[in-house]
Each structure stands twice: as structure tokens, then as C-alpha cells.
Amino acid sequence: MKTSRRILAALLVCLCATLPVSNAQSQSDTPLMVLRYNQPNIYYDKQLFNAVSKAVAIKPSVTFSLVSFVPTTGGEAMASAANSHSSTLVSKLQAMGIPAAHIKVSQQAVNDAKHHEIYLYVD
């Protein structure tokens, strides 16, 4: 299992230049993919498809954990947008054939973040 995680960590697809240290320390493993919503539209469909396809090829019964990091300074609008982004990502994973039972979703408030981010982990 550790070997699979190392292999999947090597497949890391990152849409941002640098991960914030505070968020990266919130999870012990390296994420498969990080989505940073620091602009109105981010395009990640191709990267998501490639990363998920490789993960499924390595382990067909793979389970994904989606961790949504929401800035505490964004108020209700930021929380609503974060929920929408998470729902969209779950829908895209399901459209790729990932069963709902293989997708775990959680949310964490972050004091020092400026933008909503979603970390996609492989369990």
C-alpha cells in the first residue's frame, strides 16, 4: 500500500506554483492533485482525467479523499463557493466512473488562506 501511495504521489498534478505550507501540513500524504480557486475560472479537466485514470490503472478499487480548505475570512459567500466547487469535482469524478462510495469529502477552515483550495488524495 505504501508503494502505491508513492507511485501515486509521483503522479502529482498541481495547478499552482507553490503549495501553502499551512495547508500542506494538514494532511500527512502528498495530494494527487491540488485545485486552487484563485481566479474566476480554472481549467483542470484534462489534468484530473489523467491523474484519476493513472490512479485507477494502478489500483482499480482506489478511493479518493477530497479535502476542501476554506478561508475563514471569506464569509458565507466563500463557503457557498467552496461547496459548489466540491460538488462539481465530485460530479466530475463520478462522470469518470468513480463510484460515490469511493469518494470521501471533508472540509476544513483555514485562518491564513486567501483562496479556496481542494486537495485530492488517494487512499
Image: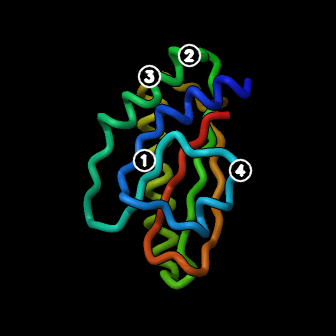
Compare marks 3 and 1 and give the one earlier in the sequence: 3
Q: Are marks 3 and 1 in contact (CB under 8 Å)?
A: no
Element at label 4: loop
Q: Residue, x 73% and y 24% (percent of image)?
A: 1
Mark 3 neighbour density, 10 Å: few (under 14) some (14–19) many (20 or more)? some
Mark 1 neighbour density, 10 Å: few (under 14) some (14–19) many (20 or more)? few
Label annotation for residue 88: 1
Residue 9, percent across and down?
Answer: 56, 36
Element at label 3: helix
Residue 52, percent across and down?
Answer: 46, 28
Mark 2 neighbour density, 10 Å: few (under 14) some (14–19) many (20 or more)? few
Residue tagged by mark 2? Answer: 58
Closest to the camera, between mark 4 and mark 3, is 4
Element at label 2: helix
Closest to the camera, between mark 3 and mark 1, is 3
Q: Residue, x 68% and y 54% (percent of image)?
A: 27
Compare marks 4 and 2 and give the one earlier in the sequence: 4
Q: Whole-Å distance between the Cαs marked 3 and 1? A: 18 Å
Closest to the camera, between mark 2 and mark 3, is 2
Residue tagged by mark 3? Answer: 53
Q: Amino acid at mark 2?
A: Ile
Mark 4 neighbour density, 10 Å: few (under 14) some (14–19) many (20 or more)? few
Compare marks 1 and 4 and give the one earlier in the sequence: 4
